[in-house]
Amino acid sequence: MSLEPDAYPSPPLPPSGHDPVLLREVLSLLAPAPGKIIVDCTTGRGGHAQAIAEKLGSTGQLICLDADPRNLEFARQRLADVPCPVRFFHANFAELDEVLQAAGIPKIDGLLADLGISTNQLFEPQYGMSFSNDMPLDMRVDPRVEKTAADLVNHLREEDLANVLYELAQERCSRRIARKIGDARRLSPIITTGRLADLVRSAIPRRGGAPEKIDPATRTFLALRMAVNREMENLAALLKTAPKFFQPNGRFLVISFQSMEDRLVKQAFRTLEATGDCEILTPRPVSPLPDELAVNPRSRSSKLRAVLKK
Ligand SMILES: C[S@@+](CC[C@H](N)C(=O)[O-])C[C@H]1O[C@@H](n2cnc3c(N)ncnc32)[C@H](O)[C@@H]1O
């Protein structure tokens, strides 16, 4: 998903709920082939997984994880007729160790992490993430997570809330927004995306000149989603755990949608290369070509990096 979740105007929701980004590039760098074992640790709506499974033939194996059991179920149905065996795990990719142990798989040939959220998660009211429509404020992709965005917004100290907005989305008006939220929640709890978005917008001074390209509430919503789902912590855990599972010639691919994530991936891959065990396959991150951008403008901020185990 794009960094600008509610950049407007929004293109319509695709029929599958999500268009896989950089699909050609993923297939080329991941090199799925008969007999290989591949992990898609952000299966989502199964777009990448389906294309990968077709390449694995009947002798390969695909392991599908997602923190969201609703997306995982959709993918399970979508992949019902692919040629290779597929196993599905409702799990966080930070739990990769446990999943591979449960699956009895000591080594893998490739792993894809397509970070963030799928388009349907942004728009479906049950996820409570969007300010395009008013909905209960939630933002959890995994129902096992205890605290919702409403919990954070209503219970974090103002100073901590401001830090979340600044650190995770570089929101320059973080303190004003936190103060506005603090004042409002003393009157009544903030429990809808619409009320939160209005509060944020009212806290950000309007600039003269051309209208902003993105809604002023975008950064706050992004930061809260990242905090609720512990996105940076989970990515750091995956980058630390995954490398030990690769066979020689194993490929580790990560698609990120914002600079903080991409920086973390870049640093982790450089460290892997420095050990002499791995080779970076993408000296520069791979971005969508104009033909993809034309049909899927939501792919615009995606960046793909890949590393090869020697
Ligand atoms: C961008 S979508 C993936 C789309 C997918 N590649 C496709 O083609 O449909 C990201 C998915 O990762 C899941 N996700 C996010 N964080 C996760 C985590 N830490 N562990 C497992 N799944 C996660 C989300 O629930 C979402 O389904």
Image: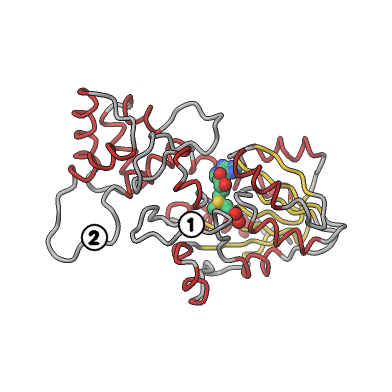
Instruction: Tell me whether circle 1 and circle 2 mark residues in contact (CB < 8 Å).
Output: no
Helix, strand or loop at label 1? It is loop
- Pointer 1: residues within 10 angstroms few (<14), some, or many (20+)? few
Task: List the residue tagged with mark 1.
Answer: 13
Side of 118 where 87 appears, left or right: right
Which residue of the protein is positioned furthest toward the right in this rendering?
Answer: 59
Residue on which disc 2 sits: 212
Mark 2 burial class by Cα count in 10 Å: few <14, some 14-19, many 20+:
few
Place of residue 160 in the rendered image (x, y in percent of width and height, measured from the top left) = 31, 31
For the residue marked with disc 2, what is the amino acid? Answer: Glu
13, above or below 293, in the image: above
Q: CA distance from mark 1 to mark 2?
A: 23 Å
Q: In this orientation, which residue lies closer to the viewer: 161 or 196? A: 196
Q: Quadrant of the C terminus?
A: bottom right
Residue 212 falls in image quadrant: bottom left
Q: Residue at x 68, y 54 (%)?
A: 111
In the image, residue 293 sits, relative to residue 62, either above or below, namely: below
Where is residue 215? Give x, y as percent.
28, 53
Task: Name above or below for residue 225 compared with residue 291.
Answer: above
**Residue type pointed to by label 1:** Leu
User: Which residue shows up at 62% across the image and 43% down it?
Assistant: 66
Q: In the rendered picture of this protein, how many numbered marks are placed on residues?
A: 2
Q: In the depicted view, which residue is nearer to us: 296 or 290?
A: 296
